Image (spheres, grey):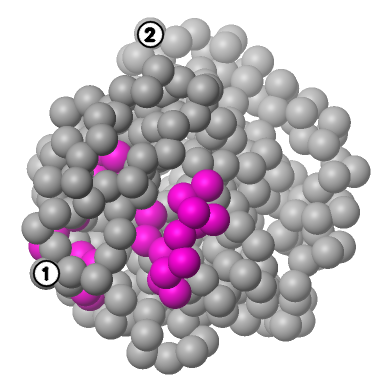
Amino acid sequence: MPTLAADEALEDCLEALARQTMRDYEIIVVDNSGRNLVRAREGVRVIYNDRNVGFGAAINQGIRDSEAPYVAILNDDAVAGPGWLEALTQAIAERHEIGMCASQIRLAVDGRLDSAGMLVSKDGSSKQCGHLDPPENYARLRHALFPSGCAAMYKREMLDEIGLFDESFFLYCEDTDLGLRARWAAWECVYVPEAIVEHRYSHSAGEASALKAYYVERNRLFVLVKNFPAPLLWAAPFYSLARYFWHLLYGWKGQGKAAAYRRAGNHTAGLAGAVLRAHADMLRNLSRLRKQRSNMRRRLTSKQFRGLIDQYSISPRKVAAL
């Protein structure tokens, strides 16, 4: 569990973990504040960083510092129900091929669903499956593409094979990259409705900010170059243009993420600048990304992977609307 603010949200999170029905687990908090804000307490191991090393790097520190066969990650602004760990552990141990489990993540503000796993658009954008739907619509165990990094469980055997989170992402979309790398290696994911978590949405980085716009756009390009097969790569720019169109239209109507960005006091020109900067950064990193792509563990064919993307895809319009 990485934390920057180490505020009352983290306290609520740790108190909920102390009430888990499963007892055979350890808690590792990675203090990314650079100010040693997390106080030591019984049953919690704290790793202190002298600066914010990013979400993925902090998670990797915790994984390397543990030996458990299953690794659960949890945002510091999420409160897990008492049966969260037990439900995830039972599901991931059901079959060897299951390498990831997605939680039922609910919005703390109104109880609607935040995520029942993740979906991917054909331009590399990722969005929560079932976002803003009633939780009752997702009451059964089902397959998912990959879990949201807000509250997920991973099998260590899988991580040992495909690698940990890509630390170059720094913030956002690390779960997308890891999940797609796992799917290429033929690991499966299941959504576990009994693993309930309440989430204060974007409590740490803000729901709509220039920082978030830049990292989300840059990292979806990283995801594309690293993970998408050639036929989807060639088509991706057209899906991106469609998403930009819908962002503009919904923003003009006062809807969607573009409108939320403006309501937060940001200027539209700043959003365009974030997109341009993201593309420039992708080009600067292109050689490294292509090397990572070539070194990826693959058991699926390109056709099989494209089938997965088709099965769990979300349209550019829906991405812009959420």
Q: At 81% from the left edge and 48% from the top edge, which residue is drawn?
A: 289
Q: Which residue is mark 2?
A: 265
Residue 218 screen position, x and y as percent: 66, 34
Camera-nearest residue between 150 and 304? 150
Residue 91 picture location, percent across and down: 32, 81
Residue 241, horizontal then vertical, whole percent: 66, 38
Q: Secondary structure at mark 1?
A: loop
Looking at the rendered structure, the kind of residue marked 2 is Gly
Q: Nearer the viewer, residue 220 or 167?
A: 167
10 Å crowding of disc 1: few (<14), some (14-19), many (20+): some
Q: Which callout, 1 or 2, points to the residue nearer the camera?
A: 1
Which residue of the protein is positioned furthest toward the bottom in this rendering?
Answer: 95
Residue at mark 1: 21
Q: Is residue 131 left or right of residue 239?
A: left
Q: Secondary structure at mark 2?
A: loop
Q: Residue at x 42, y 64 (%)?
A: 71
- Asked if residue 268 shows in the view, the reply is yes
- Is 109 magenta? The answer is no
Q: Quadrant of the C terminus?
A: top left
Tag count: 2
Q: What's the CA distance linking mark 1 and mark 2?
A: 43 Å
209 to the left or right of 303: left
Left/right placement of residue 167 relative to residue 19 reads right
Q: Looking at the image, which residue is at 37% across and 61% down?
A: 72
The answer to whether 183 is drawn above or below residue 147 in the figure is below
Residue 240 rendering spot, x and y as whole percentages: 65, 42
What's under tag 1, amino acid-wise? Answer: Thr
Q: Which residues are magenta?
A: 61-87
Choose top left, top right, bottom left or bottom right for residue 191: bottom left
